[in-house]
Amino acid sequence: MSGDVENFPKAKQALRVEVRSAGSKPKDPIKPGDFAEFIEKAVEEHESALIGYARIFVHDLDRARDVVQDTFILLCQQDPDEVREHSKSWLLTASR
């Protein structure tokens, strides 16, 4: 994420892509109590890989951590039902 406030709504809208294989049906919606668990699981599973990925672009560990933090903040603003099926690719796209 470049940090441009003006581009934030466009980036947020561009990242809201629903990916489903043909014939698959959506899962039950995430309950409010499960939202924190969804975010914690995403951080646990993907944080270190995202830091490494972001570091490729910014060439600085502290800045890469900032990018990943911004990415997870953006994830918190998404509808988890729309991103949970492809959270890894969504996170990579958002961090780039």
Image (cartoon, rainbow, N blue to C red):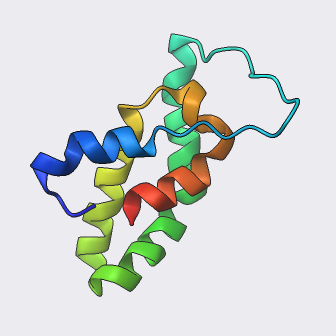
Q: Is residue 84 above or below residue 5?
A: above
Q: Is residue 73 above or below residue 56?
A: above
- Residue 57 position within the rendered picture, expressed as x and y whole percent measured from the top left: 34, 81
Q: Is residue 17 left or right of residue 56?
A: right
Q: Is residue 27 above or below residue 3?
A: above
Residue 67 falls in which quadrant of the image? bottom left
- Residue 49 position within the rendered picture, expressed as x and y whole percent measured from the top left: 54, 69
Q: Is residue 54 left or right of residue 7?
A: right
Inspect this view and state whether residue 73 appears. Answer: no
Inspect this view and state whether residue 54 appears. Answer: yes
Q: Residue at x 47, y 38 (%)?
A: 16
Q: Nearer the viewer, residue 70 or 20?
A: 20
Q: Nearer the viewer, residue 83 or 15?
A: 15
- Residue 37 position within the rendered picture, expressed as x and y whole percent measured from the top left: 56, 30
- Count of labels in the image: 0
Residue 54 falls in which quadrant of the image? bottom left
Q: Residue at x 57, y 20 (%)?
A: 34
Q: Residue at x 50, y 37 (%)?
A: 39
Q: Quadrant of the C terminus?
A: bottom left
Which residue is the extreme one toward the front? Answer: 22
- Residue 61 position within the rendered picture, expressed as x and y whole percent measured from the top left: 30, 79
Q: Is residue 10 left or right of residue 82?
A: left
Q: Nearer the viewer, residue 54 or 14?
A: 14
Q: Is residue 2 left or right of residue 23?
A: left
